[in-house]
Image: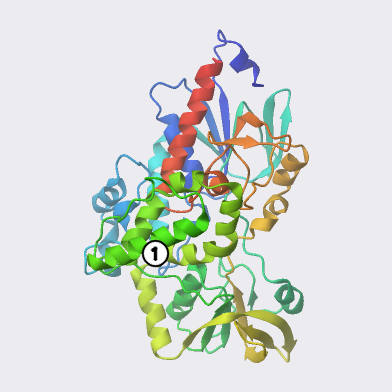
Amino acid sequence: MTLSPFFRSSTSSAKPDIAIIGGGVTGAAVAYHLAHQEKAPKTDIVIFEPRERIGKGLAYDTADPVHRINVPAARMSLLPDDPDHFTRWLEAADILCDDAEAIRPDGSVFPRRGVFGDYVFSCVRPLLETGGIRHVRSAASTVEKIDGRWHIVSDNGESVDADILVIATTHPAPAPPRRLASALAGHPRFVANPTAAEALAPIRQGDRVLVVGNGLTSADVIASLKQRGHTGRISAVSRRGLRSRGHASITQEPYGDFLSSPETRASRLVMRIRKAIRDAAKEGLTWHAVLDQVRAQGSGLWSALSTAERRRIVRHLRPYWDVHRFRIAPQVEEVLDHEIATGMLEIRAGSIEGAEIVDDVIRIVIRPRGGDGMEQHEFDAVVVTTGPAHSRLLSSQDWLWRLSEAGHIKIDATGLGLDCDRDALAIGKAGAANQSLFIAGPLARGQFGELMGFPQVPEHARFVATCIEAVIQSSG
């Protein structure tokens, strides 16, 4: 164990410094739980986050009224042991008084996504005001390990030396297919990153729009366009033509048991899930209840699989898991259903084989899935919603690349994020865990399985905070 002088001297009066890079929900939750640990020694916690408010992150830093949480509010809480914390906050602040669409006929609540970001910020705000957490409002620029400590310099030139470093960043932004990127670069209505502010503004009301990808971001883009008064036809194309599913029309408890004698082969696990869905149907339940149980038991299921079996799931099954697990809010689902029913939205399965610009019109060549021929279509705008570019993680930020080059981090065997052990400690290129470097949130998926939704995100954040506490106490 190689830690700072603080950890090597039990008589030191100094507090350990903890730096967290990334101030979205994961980073905010790690800091929150660190600051509220009763038995842990007091620590100085610094979060590097360029956004004005801690807790917003990419997902919840939106003012678009059609962007809603895709999990009922009753299951969205920063505190794993207090699942109603968010709903009580909504009621106390009367947040939904001007949002009649948030409450569904069955009583479930799907507020706007920005509201949840406000809630997370409200949880950490007292800590920011009292100095329990310090916010460096800038992105990390360089990260080095010098004399046993982590030296972080931000884009604005501020530097911090920390005993423990937590990487809590999210996945890289989507990367447009090469054929599109090279052929459409510079076109005013080629939107390579729809999450950027006002990214959809150049799209005109009657434009024919191609949306590349069919996941949650695709659904948000289509709903946002309709909110803006868009009247043109929209085509959404993805390799398999899978569309994100909605929520069950009735409230259901998770169904099934997959941890008793957990499967060690992906094929057997799929067979077991399918059987559970059939059994659930006999009891009047939908597949949602089964997938909810798979999600709840996901960490245990994932840990029972070998690296080879995990790779099989990532390669063959992840697209199907994503569209069933990450469900769209009912309000968004209604928009998509209406557009499909009126013929204004077409969901297609295929791959893009070519693109060119002819007199400001975008010509796209699509190979339909399962077909031998090619189809040529004309569009006025193209929006890329293909999901995170996992393969570009290290190159997405210079400091990550340099940490990799220095041997401190490496991509995990599944390609989903950064390699770490069961204590969330980063595993470097030499194969050893670094006792002062932790991976939190989505980038730890390769080790822990599903870490992209609730309640897994705050549960994992609390777990990481507990692991950090254990390292501090064992080194004091």
357 over 155 or under it: above or below? below
User: Residue 464: x, y in percent?
Assistant: 49, 35
Q: Quadrant of residue 299?
A: top left
Q: Quadrant of residue 249?
A: bottom left
Label 1 packing within 10 angstroms: few (<14), some (14-19), many (20+):
some
315 over 472 or under it: above or below? below
Residue 472 appears in view = yes
Residue at 31% x, 49% y: name it: 86
User: Residue 144: x, y in percent?
Assistant: 73, 34
Q: Quadrant of residue 141?
A: top right
* Three-letter code, disc 1: Arg
Q: Quadrant of the N terminus?
A: top right
48 over 386 or under it: above or below? above
Out of 64 and 257, give the one closest to the viewer. Answer: 257
Q: Secondary structure at mark 1?
A: helix
Out of 221 and 284, give the one closest to the viewer. Answer: 284
Out of 260 and 362, give the one closest to the viewer. Answer: 260
Judge from the rendering whether residue 365 lies leftward or rightward of residue 350; answer left or right.
right
Judge from the rendering whether residue 40 lies leftward or rightward of residue 209; answer left or right.
left
278 over 9 or under it: above or below? below
User: Residue 115: x, y in percent?
Assistant: 38, 56
Out of 403 and 123, give the one closest to the viewer. Answer: 403
Mark 1 lies on residue: 274
